[in-house]
Image (cartoon, helix red, strand yellow):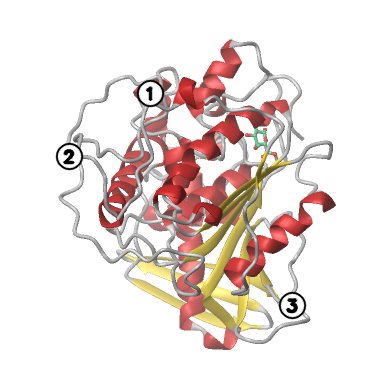
Amino acid sequence: CIPSTQASSTIPTTTLVTSVTPPPASSASSASATRATSTSAATCSALLGSISLKANAKLNDLFTMFNGDKVTTKDKFACRQAEMSELIQRYELGTLPGRPATVTASFSGNTLTINCGDSGKSISFTVTITYPSSGSAPYPAIIGYGGGSLPAPAGVAMINFNNDNIAAQVNTGSRGQGKFYDLYGKTHSAGAMTAWAWGVSRVIDALELTPSARIDTTRIGVTGCSRNGKGAMVAGAFEKRIVLTLPQESGAGGSACWRISDYLHSQGANIQTASEIIGEDPWFATAFNSYVNQVPTLPFDHHSLAALIAPRGLFVIDNNIDWLGPQSCFGCMTAARSAWQALGVPNNIGYSQIGSHAHCAFPSNQQSQLTAFVQKFLLNQNTNTAIFQSDFTFSPSQWVDWTTPTLS
Ligand code: MCU
């Protein structure tokens, strides 16, 4: 359901998101030393106040703070991640609230009920859990927006998260609808993707509170396809308890970079851009509207969003449909990979772009790659995740004017 022309554009519906807790760089390092670099909690200087933006046609430097300070250590990179998260929330995705005053949960018949309360208001929502026929409890789990579009891996529980219930995504008129807004108010700045990420965090809170659900909360993944793939990437970026992020065919607003997509559009590609996407659904904050026609002034791009996930696991699953901007996605994730390289774990990010199949129909020739990531990050096995492939090329000299340090 991807439009073949820019004009019509409705694709089925689905959903996801985090929080700006200051930077314990990685909480994902629970399992084996091969999969995550542990970064001790860093003390960062105060977050940004009022700033002025200046245009930059290149992808923003992941290793220079907004004030010009160079990032040379893992601790400082954690501060840079916190800063990038703040910038992304401010100019694109809206503010992510933390844990509400009360979170309680109950579990019955494979349904987990999550109750949240704050400032005199309360909401309740449910997720359903499908347990694997192999493995042993407590199980690792993948939270799937709208159930996700990946085959359930052996030994892994699947958690069906109805993201649309948290924040609707029917059209731009859906803004402010959904449980998140019932709790925080219809005019809250969070776009739908931020609201979804908040919901994912509450699902994990609830699982932590509910041992009878038999889920190991140190081994949680997240996935979604298309619009829900965008959401899955945002959830992985914001929620550090997620150890494996699996965005599928996320395109614009997900694995694509706004700058590269605008360039390809200027070259005649039928590709979704920032200025087009805000007319579809309330996935972003309204603040983003002011920047979609001046993308170079954004102090980040989606390589920065992806870099919030480092050093945790990220496997980006893409197709080659023009509208999704496959060349932009490959270039953007290649630039993002610098974060994992700098942290000494280059294979904790994987990228696989394989086409010739329907949108969101996971092809069998990506299965072994997905399995390698699932086994490494959710089943604590030593697998080879050196996967980075596309039929497209990326020209670093066109997009990157910074170097990747080795962080100490
Ligand atoms: C790839 O995600 C979206 C895309 O951004 C939209 O332009 C289109 O309408 O729907 C896609 C989708 O969610 O497909 C299921």
Q: Residue at x 42, y 40 (%)?
A: 304
Q: Secondary structure at mark 1?
A: helix
258 to the left or right of 122: right
Q: Nearer the viewer, residue 330 or 406?
A: 406
Q: Position of residue 30 (x, y in %)?
A: 45, 74
Mark 1 crowdedness (10 Å alpha carbons): few <14, some 14-19, many ≥20: few
Q: Earlier in the sequence, mark 1 or mark 2?
A: 2
Callout 1–callout 2 Cβ contact below 8 Å: no
Answer yes or no: disc 3 within 8 Å of ligand 1: no
> Is 126 drawn above or below residue 4 in the view shown?
below
For residue 323, the mark is: none
**Which part of the image, by quadrant, shows the C terminus?**
bottom left
Callout 3–callout 1 Cβ contact below 8 Å: no
* Residue holding disc 1: 290
Q: Quadrant of ligand 1?
A: top right
Q: Position of residue 14 (x, y in %)?
A: 65, 49
Q: Position of residue 176 (x, y in %)?
A: 47, 44
What's the distance in space between the residues labelled 1 and 2, CA to CA?
19 Å
For residue 49, the mark is: 2
Residue type at the position of mark 3:
Pro
> Is 156 drawn above or below residue 339 in the view shown?
below
Question: Does residue 126 appear in the picture of this structure?
Answer: no
Residue type at the position of mark 2:
Gly
